[in-house]
Amino acid sequence: MPQFGFTQQQILEPKESGVRAVGRAGTISTPHGDIQTPAFIPVGTKATVKSVLPESMKDLGAQALLANAYHLYLQPGCDIIDSAGGVGKFMNWSGPTFTDSGGFQVMSLGVGFKKVLAMQTDTVQRDDVIADHKERLAHVDDDGVTFKSHLDGSMHRFSPEISMQVQHQIGADIMFAFDELTTLMNTREYQEMSLERTRLWAIRCVEEHKRLTIERTDKPYQALFGVIQGAQYEDLRRKASRDLGAMDFDGYGIGGALDKNSLSTIVRWVSEELPADRPRHLLGIGEPEDFFAGVESGADTFDCVAASRAGRNAAVYTKFGRFNITNAKYRRSFAPVTDDCACYTCTHYTQAYLHHLVHAKELLAATLLTIHNEYFVVNLVARIRESILDGTYYELKDEFLGTFAGRSL
């Protein structure tokens, strides 16, 4: 049975002289198939990409899917998924799978489910970060996290060992070490303390992962990625990369709080320190314009809910930017969403029909718009890969960013 590996195929030479080359194209090998990188990994939080069949995700070009360990632990329970033969079989997905560790949920529960707190840099830094009028549902200590289920209020405990046990039962090809995700509002002192906590948790994750791998020899090998934290601090990001880079991880996730204006710089700091023979996954980044910054700085794979969430909210990606299908001008437009898209939605349905579905609150609207948006981002990153291989990357970047530019039409 194939194990796990990464092969670097082509280095992307920087446009500026004197800059170290870290962008690349490669192949990640897993027991359930290869992933050609750079690649976008759609998020199927609860073992489903919301409103879309797994077969449709395969048809639109998705190579792998990422599920959420925290949510699957609470419902239906990791023991049920293990009995089903792992998350892939459980959801009828034959390709590679990822699970995150629950680290993000620790942060979101701890600050009251307000993700934007991670991005706020214009406020006074403090360590008692909590959204207004919200309850802190997670409490972190050096051994792990105690949290209250958002489903029924029951109390639970995650430690590095429990996270590994949960993820082994879920059975994804690639899983992430348990980490503490801070916000940009936390003080430098707290960032340092949290980084050390995550380092010690990483050691425990590696040890438990090794134990479970030996214990579960009847199961396919699961790769373990360490998670690099350090917020916006170069010394902390580089230290975390050196510390975890020396551990026995199969790859690395680049996570944590960051200002998106600094995304490229932070990813480059990390990529310059991590071992070049292992893949790097940029966690939670999926806006089309961000892929170029991530790839040039060394990211191999990405995941994000943005494309599917946008689709459920009637927002549509095109090469000219985003637009909302609810706009009145689409009511009588019998053109496809975009006339240069080969996705199932664009080749079978019109703007007028999609406009109708949204206004009628039909569930099919979410399905068709999500298929289009996921196709758009999956195939954009696939085009980036091909442009690295054929030497046209900077031409593609200039062309795409020249027309898209994050605009709303």
Image: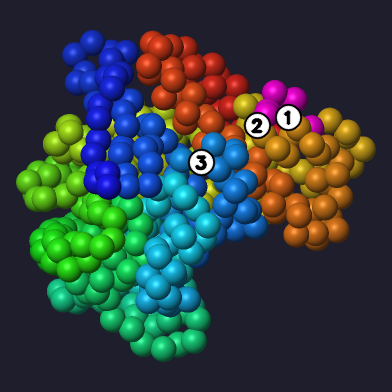
86 or 99, which is in the foreground? 86
Label 3: element kind:
loop
Label 1: element kind:
loop
Q: Amino acid at mark 2?
A: Thr
| Neighbourhood count class around disc 1 (C-alpha, 10 Å): few under 14, some 14–19, many 20 upward | some
| Above or below, comparing residue 157 to residue 258 in the picture | below
| Neighbourhood count class around disc 2 (C-alpha, 10 Å): few under 14, some 14–19, many 20 upward | many
Give the side of residue 290 with respect to residue 155, left or right.
Answer: right
284 or 185, which is in the foreground? 284
Q: Residue at the location (63% across, 53% down)?
A: 52
Give the total of numbered labels: 3
Which residue does the numbered mark 3 point to in the structure image? 62
Q: Position of residue 397 (x, y in %)?
A: 47, 20
Which residue does the numbered mark 2 point to in the structure image? 318
Q: Residue at the location (28% across, 31% down)?
A: 298
The outermost residue toward the right is 332
Q: Amino acid at mark 3?
A: Ala
The span shown in magenta is: 336-342
| Neighbourhood count class around disc 3 (C-alpha, 10 Å): few under 14, some 14–19, many 20 upward | many
Give the side of residue 351 with respect to residue 344, left or right.
Answer: right
Q: Give me the disc on residue 338.
A: 1
C-alpha gap between disc 1 and disc 3: 20 Å
Are dots 2 and 1 in contact, CB under 8 Å? Answer: yes
C-alpha gap between disc 2 and disc 1: 7 Å
